[in-house]
Amino acid sequence: MSPSLRRKGASVLGELPRGAHLCMIYESTDDLLDSVVPFLRIGLENNEFCVWAPPGKPTLEKFRMALERRIPNFDRHLEAGNVVILDREIYLKGDHVDHLGLMSDLINMFHSALAKGHNGMRASGDAFWTDTGQWSEFCNYEFKLSKLLKGKPLALLCTYPMIMSEAVEVSEAVGAHQLAVARQNGDWKLVETTPATARSHSTAQKIGILTGKLLSERERNIINLMAQGNSDKEIARSLAISPETVKTYVTRIFVKLNCYKRTRAVALAQSLGIVNAY
């Protein structure tokens, strides 16, 4: 991660490099708000202009009310023009993604924000495109955004509903972002998606990393115990299962991580934030 971080704010979403381009796959509206709220709140605390284009459901008014409950003085910020909530239809021109228009609007808003005295800009948008047939075009737009953002005091958080993770094409979007916001062990963390994750992991692994579901709860328990140096017999005693069952789980972990030595599997799991460092 770049050393030029904006450090203000306790959340992991407050410590972002210039030009950060993040993605997050979410299951529920609560998951979506759990990431977008701190992203916008910390931006407002840092005097950054904030923009959000939420999904179509629930309504924009309900999302505004949700932000009002979660972000101090949100109405005042909204009235002052420090934050705006946009309809997701801004992505489309007719039935096509308007790439040039979107990037032009983004840069115009960014320069306008700086001219008004803001320290930078944060924007988040939801990509619910399963019914448009424009997925490939949208992924191309995401790649172009990464280049456009480089070095600017501008951060983007792109959110994708879990239903889209069933499609192989989601891996294209993952690779278009520098970082992913993943919920692991109940906490939000930043996971690097390029170059290592995007290039060296399969589509299933990428989606697993983003959703925090690469390993099952039992598999996470076992690899945590592996990381502490426990043998199969010791793990079996700790979990009240047989050593043969432990071996079966260990084999599954090796396959999912594409690592077939305990030390390498543990090291990879630690790098992905699946287990803590010991």
Image (spheres, rainbow, N blue to C red):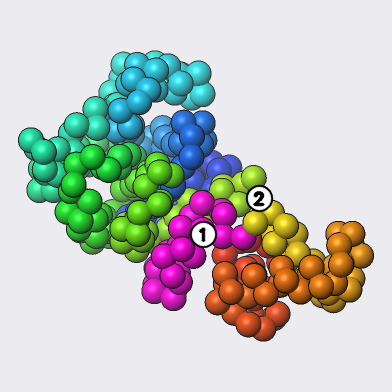
How far, Cα to Cα, is label 2 from label 1? 12 Å
For this orientation, the residue located farthest to the bottom is 261
Decide which of 170, 131 is in the foreground and name it.
131
Give the x, y percent position of residue 137. 17, 54
Query: Relative to the observer, which residue lies in front, 114 or 245?
Result: 245
- Residue on which the image places disc 1: 209
Label 2: how many residues lie within 10 Å, few (<14), some (14-19) or many (20+)?
some
Q: How far across and down, in percent of the image, does residue 12 sit?
A: 54, 48
Q: Is residue 276 visible?
A: no
Residue density around tag 1, few if under 14, some if 14–19, many if 20 or more, within 10 Å? many
Tell which of 189 and 131 is nearer to you: 131
Query: Within the image, what quadrant is residue 43 found in?
Result: top left
Write the residue at 35% across / 54% down: 167
The reply to whether residue 161 is visible in this rendering is yes
Q: Amino acid at mark 2?
A: Asn
Amino acid type at circle 1 is Ile
Magenta extent: 191-215
Q: Quadrant of residue 82?
A: top left
* Mark closer to the chain start, 2 or 1: 2
The residue sitting at 76% across, 74% down in the picture is 247
Left or right of 38, for residue 49: left
- Identify the residue position indicated by label 2 in the image: 185
The answer to whether residue 207 is magenta is yes
Q: Is residue 200 left or right of residue 113?
A: right
* Residue closest to the eye, 41 or 120: 41
- Tell me if residue 198 is in the magenta stretch: yes
Residue 106 place in picture, x, y as percent: 19, 42
Q: Secondary structure at mark 2?
A: loop
